[in-house]
Image (tube, rainbow, N blue to C red):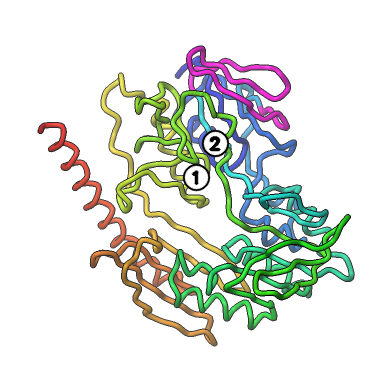
Amino acid sequence: MSTRHIVVVGASLGGTRTAQALRERGFDGRLTLVGDEPHLPYDRPPLSKQLLAGTWEHEEIALPLAPDPCLELRTGNPATAVRLADRALELADGSSLSWDSLVIATGAGARPWPGPVPAGVLTLRTLDDARALRDALRAPDARLLVVGAGFLGAEAAATAAAAGVPVTLVEAEARPLARNVGTAAGEFLARLHREAGIDLRTGTTVRSFTGTTRVTGADLDDGTHVPATVVLLALGAVPRTEWLHGSGLRLDGAVVCDEHGRARTDDGAVAEGVVAVGDAARWPNPLTGDTLHLGHWSNAVEQAAVAARTLLHPAEAGELPEPPLSVPSFWSDQHGVRIRSLGLPHLADEVRVVEYDLPGRRLEVAYHRDGELVGALTANRVRRLADYRPRLAETLRRRRTAAVAAAAAAAAG
């Protein structure tokens, strides 16, 4: 199809899926996949579960790459800058790559603690992070403190507790994830943790860590002290776009894109031949009426397919087809319970609890805004969740149609 050179920056899910989608759509030119880690590409969700538990290793989470003589994989060599004018990518080893098209898929990093920390205070975003945490938890006297009861922190806490490690889970809000999924679901999750033996502390956070050469615990804002031999900071994720500062691309935390994944420049124009996907990107979402950054596995997969189509069918060949409607989805495994969500529950102004059965480990919650369904969450009710998808798709379709009509009217007026 082409002798063009497409460079994909980010050798994780979004980047590898974009490379695969390009090949599936017939691209036979040069592909270069640039990764900052020394490992072959791998999937991240198992890091806080199977890999942390020791039941899987790198081989089980590796992302498949078909044999490809025109694909060059550069690992352990992160991108440091991009020059749009001359289409060049600068790498940490001092080399540079020229490109005809560029895919930005550098993901997100762990939000750090705002200050120095003693040894034993860890984060969990990479394979090496997971191995370091796993090794620390295998010590005979291990005690884990998790700071932040979001999905990542909760999964790691559940994995450690299942292995017999004493766990304290600290959350600043009154209930885990209540800001994102509401008080009922937050209380359900809190009770799951406590029934599993986790010491859940809510409405407080860490004031400071104790220990000089190595962490011995933490003092909390409520005046209590938590002993710990290892601390996991689960404070959220930060898009890894610092290397794009000064590039001319518009950044709002992540790279701002249009509905086709095309990156925007500082003046709002489309950056020719540049797309962004996954945790490093902000795409428009009809539910919010604005661009949205979603750190979801399914989001990266769906955006990769759209971005590949965009690069191979540029606008000059005709209008790009309307992108498919994508219902945001997410899942989490905690204490043997499969938690799944659709849509954007945090937008709700009304939360309807359909089922709340803690002994049966079942939950079903619907989220509405202005009378419209905007999200749903279930625990161990996968079949029921499927019923919400077409309804959410209809909400998305209706809102996108209204937005297109409003934009046309504004342009005509």
User: What residue is shown with label 2?
Assistant: 105
N-terminal of the pair, mark 1 or mark 2, is: 2
Q: Residue 238, relative to residue 16: is it above or below?
A: below
Q: Residues within 10 Å of mark 2 (few under 14, many from 20)?
A: many
User: Residue 300, labelled with which disc?
Assistant: 1
Q: Tell me residue 275's x, y (percent).
A: 45, 30
Q: State the residue at coordinates (12%, 38%).
A: 409
Which three-letter amino acid code belongs to the residue tagged 2?
Ala
In-image side of 94 versus 243 (left or right): right
Tell me the element at label 2.
Answer: loop
Marks 1 and 2, how far apart in space? 9 Å
Residue 100 is a magenta residue: yes
Task: Find the residue positioned furthest to the left.
Answer: 413
For the C terminus, give its image quadrant. top left
Segment tinted magenta in the rendering: 73-101
Residue 196 percent coordinates (x, y): 67, 80
Label 1 crowd bin: few (<14), some (14–19), many (20+), radius 10 Å: many
- From the viewer's perspective, is 28 left or right of 155? left
Q: Are marks 1 and 2 in contact (CB under 8 Å)?
A: yes
Tell me: residue 129, above or below residue 250: below
- Give the percent coordinates (x, y) of residue 170: 65, 69
Q: Is residue 2 above or below residue 245?
A: above
